[in-house]
Image: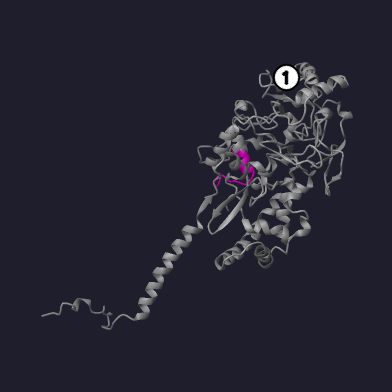
């Protein structure tokens, strides 16, 4: 009779011997390796954005999809370390570029964070270009306005630093890790992962840098401006810019009260009538891709700014003078710029408007075709881009906070805009946040203040012309002052 435990005898090899303990150990290790690799792959493929409780914080710090590796995100601690690795390329740190850091936050306004794999990655969001800093006087505490124009932000200065440092020989594993370890304690695994990430980031900088090489060949953007659509040509569509000399530089726009702008032609040249496409194209311009764009979180921003009203003028207004100025506003401005005006949201041909033509000329029929290919295969594909021959009439809500003026930021104050072009400043300085309450704009005659040198804007350069828009320029000085006083109330 067979012993009851005989069925538990060792498995015999084909040659009759028992299985080697080494083979069993190898099998166990193989299983553990597969499990470990599976866990590693799942963790490394994570993409978990940081969600903020309030809509205000979401606008300032929430994701739009630019913070993923596919969307040009940078590892958080690498980004933090770069000013230490290349101190001569950015002596004042990120704050010197007009980037706003709130106390107690781990990153400035306009930067989102997302857990991608084993590291946190950082990307730009809407607030980077749409947060204004204003001071009443040099010693005053700053006021911050969301959904406004980031007049103080040197966006090209930021990109230029990031790419210059990223290609610098000092940007290597040892130097970057040393700078990181000065700021935080990383575990052994994190140190290994970050060393790998640094090498990949450097490759990314070197690969993408040629796509931006054309920018310094044109007049510099300076604070408060960006070439909105030309970067798409190389970064999104991979086009050759060697024979393209167009200049599309323009001021950042306000993004509040989007409900009031539905159905109007948006962007400076009125090349689209879809608020959604405006928002999504801005996200792609900030670094998101069709694959990484976070529509859910962009729609949350949209829901908040749809009815967000322009901030009221924060300083004293001479109400009697403003009442007189309303007459001149109704006479010279309301038809094109009042929400009820018959021409608001429509495009005026530049042969009548006469402002600098470069921005409208830069967006041609071919570019409109390209823009309408973005999102192919998705239900949100762009379909509404077109070309125009002029600039759109935009509502003037919060016009006091939109300086400098005209589409290219070539006129420093509202009062200067009411002068004929030959009476407008040929040179002025951009980047100062102290407000000029009389002229309505920012103080622009100082080359330097508080130890900071400002950007000298030259209206004689291509794309920087300050001509045209002659409305109200024939008024008397007293009438112009009254009109400016009234516009503080808008």
Q: In which quarter of the image is residue 206?
A: bottom right
Q: Where is residue 199 in the image (x, y as percent from the top left)?
A: 63, 63
Which quadrant of the view contains residue 163?
Answer: bottom right
Q: What range of the chain is rendered magenta?
A: 280-292
Q: Position of residue 37 (x, y in %)?
A: 45, 64
In the image, 319 versus 213, the foreground residue is 319
Per the image, is 290 magenta?
Answer: yes
Image height of 163 relative to 290, above or below: below
In this picture the colour scheme is one colour
Residue at point 35%, 80% (across, down) = 21
Judge whether residue 72 can be spotted in this image. no
**Residue 417 drawn at (x, y percent):** 82, 28
Q: Circle 1 sits in a helix, a strand or a loop, which is it?
A: helix
Spot occupied by residue 302 in the image (x, y as percentages of width and height)? 58, 35
Residue at 51% over, 41% down: 377
Q: 224 above or below 210?
A: above
Q: Please tell me how many numbered marks the rendered image carries.
A: 1
Residue of label 1: 334
- Queried whether the magenta region covers residue 293, the answer comes back as no
At a point 60% along the width and 61% down the height, the residue shown is 197
């Amino acid at each position: 009779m067979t012993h009851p435990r005989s069925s538990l005898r060792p498995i015999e090899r084909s040659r009759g011997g028992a299985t080697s303990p080494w083979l069993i150990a190898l099998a166990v290790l193989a299983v553990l390796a597969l499990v470990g690799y599976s866990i590693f792959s799942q963790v490394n493929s994570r993409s978990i954005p940081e969600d903020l409780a309030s809509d205000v914080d979401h606008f300032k710090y929430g994701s739009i999809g630019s913070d993923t590796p596919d969307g040009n995100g940078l590892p958080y601690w690498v980004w933090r370390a770069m000013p230490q690795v290349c101190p001569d390329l950015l002596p004042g740190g990120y704050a010197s570029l007009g980037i706003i850091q709130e106390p107690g936050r781990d990153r400035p306004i306009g930067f989102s964070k997302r857990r991608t794999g084993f590291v946190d990655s950082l990307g730009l969001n809407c607030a980077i270009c749409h947060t204004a800093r204003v001071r009443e006087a040099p010693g005053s505490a700053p006021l911050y306005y969301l959904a406004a124009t980031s007049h103080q932000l040197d966006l090209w200065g930021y990109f230029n630093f990031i790419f210059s440092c990223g290609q610098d020989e000092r940007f290597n594993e040892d130097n970057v890790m040393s700078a990181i370890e000065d700021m935080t304690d990383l575990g052994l695994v994190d140190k290994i992962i970050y060393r790998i990430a640094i090498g990949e980031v450097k490759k990314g900088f070197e690969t993408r840098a040629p796509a931006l090489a054309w920018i310094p060949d044109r007049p510099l953007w300076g604070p408060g401006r960006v070439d909105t659509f030309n970067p798409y040509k190389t970064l999104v569509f991979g086009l050759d810019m060697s024979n393209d000399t167009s200049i599309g530089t323009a001021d950042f726009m306000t993004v509040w009260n989007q409900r009031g702008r539905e159905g109007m032609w948006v962007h400076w040249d009125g090349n689209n009538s879809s608020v959604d496409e405006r928002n999504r194209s801005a996200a792609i311009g900030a670094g998101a891709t069709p694959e990484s764009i976070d529509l859910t979180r962009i729609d949350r921003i949209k829901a908040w700014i749809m009815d967000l009203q322009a901030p009221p003028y924060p300083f004293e207004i001479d109400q009697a003078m403003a009442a007189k100025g309303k007459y001149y506003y109704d006479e010279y401005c309301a038809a094109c710029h009042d929400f009820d005006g018959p021409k608001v949201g429509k495009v005026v041909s530049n042969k009548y408007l006469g402002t600098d033509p470069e921005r409208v000329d830069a967006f041609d029929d071919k570019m409109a075709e390209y823009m309408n290919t973005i999102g192919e295969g998705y239900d949100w594909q762009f379909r509404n881009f077109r070309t125009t021959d002029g600039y759109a009439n935009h509502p003037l809500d919060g016009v006091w906070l939109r300086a400098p003026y005209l589409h290219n930021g070539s006129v420093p104050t509202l009062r200067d805009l009411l002068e004929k072009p030959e009476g407008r400043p040929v040179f002025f300085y951009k980047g100062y946040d102290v407000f000029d309450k009389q002229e309505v704009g920012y103080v622009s005659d100082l080359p330097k203040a508080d130890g900071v040198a400002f950007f000298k804007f030259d209206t004689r350069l291509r794309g920087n012309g300050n001509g045209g828009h002659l409305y109200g320029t024939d008024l008397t000085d007293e009438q112009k002052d009254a009109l400016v006083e009234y516009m503080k109330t808008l």
